[in-house]
Image: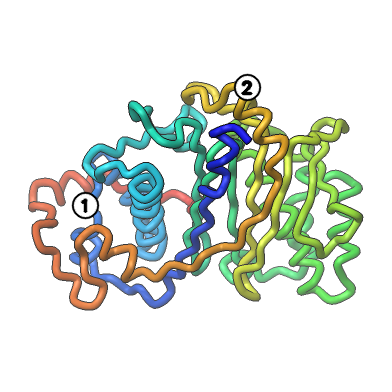
Amino acid sequence: MNEVCSIAGDMVRWAVNTTQWIPTDEQLNCCLAVLPPSEWSSVLRFSSKDDRKRALMSRLLQRKLFHDLLSIDYDSIRIERTPTGKPYLVSVPNARLPHLNFNVSHDGDYVVIVSDPVSLVGTDIISRHSHSDLLPEKLFENFTTYFTPFEWMIIRSGGPDSDSMLDQFYRHWCMKEAYVKAVGVGLGFELHRAEFHYDKDMIWGDLAHVYIDGIVATEWQFFLHKLDPEHWVCVATGPPSVRPSSAPAVANNDGESCHRTVFQSRSFTFLRVEDVLKEFGLQAASYDCGEYRIGADSENERRESTAPLSSS
């Protein structure tokens, strides 16, 4: 096995439950100050404190990921986004995993981050209780054009009870979102073009594949995870040659051949908020800011830049 394939064990699947983390504004500022100022707006654009803390945890997890996998000093980590919003690590000379791809998502109680040493990867988490309280058929009226007739048949076959039907709806939705986020195409992709089929027609199975415009995309795999009764997560992996525009190249021929041989799922590891904060010298219990504190001038700048935006 070549060197690229030999590092396939470096796939990361992390989930952090932020429910019990209720930081004050000052405590959020302490955590925010460990990030480069260029990343502050990505947290402060959210209007609700819950969204802000999830966005902040997302940024901390991204930095922890690169520090742990690539042994990069926190101060040297530079993360940018493509025009369509997919995050990527700016090239690091002599990095151990030169083709590392990652993606993040947050909703409800959780923030999740996933990575793959070779393949494109995308993830989406969806929480049942943070979305519509409508009955299934009423909710479905708002999404008629997003799913194909075949997908609607599978979604409705999840019944007869409403909860099971909604579970199928959310499973399909997070598969579509995970694909779009992996490819990095943004809002320009019409979701009905991607039709999902469960492997072996097991509609409650944890593995699926996709047809794009009616043609099966054999090199894509979709892994479904139920973190708890309220949260579904999908992890999509695909060929590295299909990369987001404006992002650096993420593969060579070795990467392509490795992707074709490495189709594997990986369970999520649950991290505690306090353990993530300790990575950055912050104490979850006392929230001692130590050297990390944002001054009054910076605080005024950040208030002016705040704008509400939906979670990712």
Q: For residue 175, say whether it is visible.
A: no
- Check the image and report above or below for 44 versus 232: above
Image side of residue 83 versus residue 49, left or right:
right
Q: Residue at x 78, y 55 (%)?
A: 141
Q: Mark 1 Cα within 10 Å, few/some/many (few <14, many 20+)?
A: many
Tell us which disc is closer to us: 2 or 1: 2
In the figure, residue 80 lies in which quadrant? top left
- Marks 1 and 2: in contact by CB < 8 Å? no
- Amino acid at circle 2: Asn
Q: Residue at x 51, y 48 (%)?
A: 10
Horizontal and vertical percent for residue 265? Answer: 67, 54
* Residue 168 position (above or below residue 179): below
Horizontally, residue 139 falls left or right of residue 295, namely right
Q: Position of residue 159 (x, y in %)?
A: 87, 71
- The numbered dot on residue 34 is 1
Residue sitting at 60 percent across and 29 percent down?
255
Residue at position x 61%, y 26% from top?
A: 254
Q: Say what amino acid the circle numbered 1 marks.
A: Val
Q: How many residues crowd mark 2 within 10 Å: few (<14), some (14–19), many (20+)?
A: few
Residue 62 at x, y percent in the picture: 39, 48
- Residue 171 vs 178, above or below: the answer is below
Q: CA distance from mark 2 to mark 1?
A: 38 Å
Which type of secondary structure does the marked residue at label 2 adopt? helix
Residue 56 found in image quarter: bottom left
Res 57 quadrant in image: bottom left
If you read the primary sequence from the N terminus, does the residue marked by circle 2 or circle 1 appear first? 1
Q: Which mark is residue 253?
A: 2
Q: Position of residue 158 (x, y in %)?
A: 86, 67
Front residue of 51 and 6: 6
Total count of labels: 2
Element type where label 1 sits in the image: loop
